[in-house]
Amino acid sequence: MRAYIHLKKEISSQTLEEMSEDSEKENYSDITISDEDESDEDTFMKFLSEDIHQCTLLTADSIGDPFFPRTTQILLEYQLGRWVPRLREPRDLYGVSSSGPLSPTRWPYHCEVIDEKVQHIDWTPYTEPVYAPTGLEMEPLYTNSKEDIVVYLAEDAYKEPCFVYSRVGGNRTPLKQPVDNCDTLMFEARFESGNLQKVVKVAEYEYQLTVRPDLFTNKHTQWYYFQVTNTQAGIVYRFTIVNFTKPSSLYNRGMRPLFYSDKEAKAHNIGWQRIGDQIKYFKNNLGQDGHHYFSLTWTFQFPYNKDTCYFAHCYPYTYTNLQDYLSNINNDPVRSKFCKIRVLCHTLARNMVYVLTITTPLKSTESRKRKAVILTARVHPGETNSSWIMKGFLDYILGDSSDAQLLRDTFIFKVVPMLNPDGVIVGNYRCSLAGQDLNRCYTSLLKESFPSVWYTRNMIHRLMEKREVILYCDLHGHSRKENIFMYGCDGSARSKALYLQQRIFPLMLSKNCPDKFSFSACKFNIQKSKEGTGRVVMWKMGIRNSFTMEATFCGSTLGNKRGTHFNTKDLESMGYHFCDSLLDYCDPDRTKYYQCLKELEEMEKHVTLEKIFDDSDTSLMEITLDLESSGRGSDSSESNDSQTYLLKLTSQLSFKKKFLKTKKERNSMIASHTNAREEQEVYGRGRLQQSHKESNSNEKGTKPNVSENYIFECFRREFPSQGLSE
């Protein structure tokens, strides 16, 4: 009690207020921690048991005196004969000490998981051309035979109809071991992000594989990642995956499977590489109940005997990879100063969803001046290429270059690098453990079912109350198109200027990265089935530049990269180009901005205005191309049969009766279009600037503005010499 009386004399309420204000100035003004996390027990503060006269820590609510507020955030430290108040340090990164082990991954309790930790080296491969079909590729068709040998079967996936609970390491019962035969390959996929359901040996060197659908669904068979051991070098093996559901694939356009050899990595430092001959994607004879399945087949020779090898649909990037990366940032004394990592929420399986706040520490006078940029990735767990783009972005923005420093001084970046860690861990392609596509759930109020997207939307909403968000981008992978491109939203209903302005950033990105990014592949519209996506929801919340960036699983058709696969370094480079384009977009010298705006207006002029024979809003070809895009709905209650889906959509199209126009009517229409074009050409750059300013003023209050005069004072750069045309 004597210590408390002494403390009361030493500390005044004014001292406490000054202390709190100083701490707020040093901290970020908008650090986001979910309600869920605030209730978690803080296990990181180590209370010392030494003598009270040396150093004692007390929380303010432990003192039963009305003078002190009841809070656990103020710590009282007894030093040198007096009590010194200070704020509790922010909770640690992983729920464990930064010097301790990472938070272990949690699996659905019934999932079998091997003890072996799978790791791969990172390397930069040589240029890898796409496969050129010869026309002689086989289409192996299999029928059930008693002579077939099942060499691998993962039965654990169907033990529960829905998610029940999780545990560290999954199923704790002894695991069934693969068949061990000197002449038979051994398969394994019970590791993080692995996916393989069944393997049947149909011939001496031929294997039929079945991949596992997303857990608690009966569809989304696209992602595969498995291990092969007991290999024999110099023998031509054939692998055929027989239960894909998409009628078309990049494998028919030259994409090759990925292969990794442990012995090759140790002997020659060679990592993932594209392999395979006789590659073909085709419809097979396994259709049941109106469902059609498709096969991917390829042949291959292993480079070593008794090797441990892996095959994958795309370069794996696991939840553990992310945690290792974030741990390195957190333990870096330089990067950790401007990159604060917090737990946004916990998933259904109680895995952590991280949010990064990247910016130069704010001063009190700057707290609301800095605008925000938001990036998210891996809402679809099988789209691993999005994580490599995210890694490239983080590598650059956390680097020591002058441009990276400029971006951190100018913006506050909010980054959610992995929205669906549960799906990533279990090897899903599209869904979470709720059996739903999270990129259709941004409008949902079910926080407990879809926590990551609920907390992300809530975080962005609160952020927009404090500052302007100038850009939102969700990173994805695409299974049907080459190159990298963007989906945006259509602002034509608001104003023509806004309609064009939303296309400026993607156009700049295509100029800065002409051999990877295709502006002509970008689309800007809102379909009803996409209204629950992050892109559309954020746009309706008021973020003018709201995009989905789609990266192909295959490669490029542009420039010097034409006809080659993208590797991890190509994907990472898109993170740099994103930052580079952001600098161009926000340069106070608006020359490049208005250059792009002018180009976009010229593009609009050359788009034909005559739609005599086109009365439908959506053509059959557009529907066919978009059937399997990453934006397609994934309601697990709906059929995944693409042909049924196509017939359903085409039956809804209403085609009006077409009447031929007289020559006089046609000449009149052409004349009116010509006059309209001539009138538009009268307006020069001054009109472009005026319309831009009018758009900003009209949208004020409903859409955030991009200021004309903010950001850089000494930053001037030119576009690359490459033109817009591909």
Image (cartoon, helix red, strand yellow):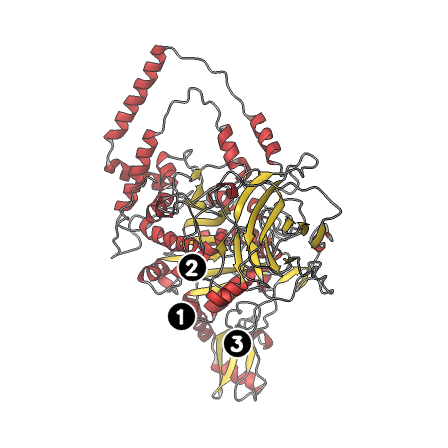
Residue 701 location (% of width, % of height) = 41, 43
Q: Are marks 3 and 1 in contact (CB under 8 Å)?
A: no
Give the residue number, with chain letter if any, for mark 3: 75
Image: 672 above or below 183: above
Q: Amino acid at mark 3?
A: Leu
How far apart are the two marked residues, 3 and 1, measured between alpha carbons?
27 Å
Q: Residue at x 70, y 59 (%)?
A: 179
Q: Quadrant of the N terminus?
A: bottom right
Residue 573 location (% of width, % of height) = 39, 55
Q: Is residue 677 left or right of residue 240?
A: left
How far apart are the two marked residues, 1 and 2, measured between alpha carbons?
27 Å
Q: Residue at x 47, y 61 (%)?
A: 356
Residue farthest to the front? Answer: 234
Of circles 3 and 1, which is in front?
A: 1
Q: Is residue 530 left or right of residue 523?
A: right
Q: Amino acid at mark 2?
A: Thr
Q: Amino acid at mark 1?
A: Val
Local secondary structure at mark 2: loop
Which quadrant of the figure has residue 187?
A: bottom right
Numbered tag placed on residue 334 in the rendering: 1
Residue toward you, 109 or 540: 109
Residue toward you, 577 or 91: 577
Numbered tag placed on residue 124 in the rendering: 2
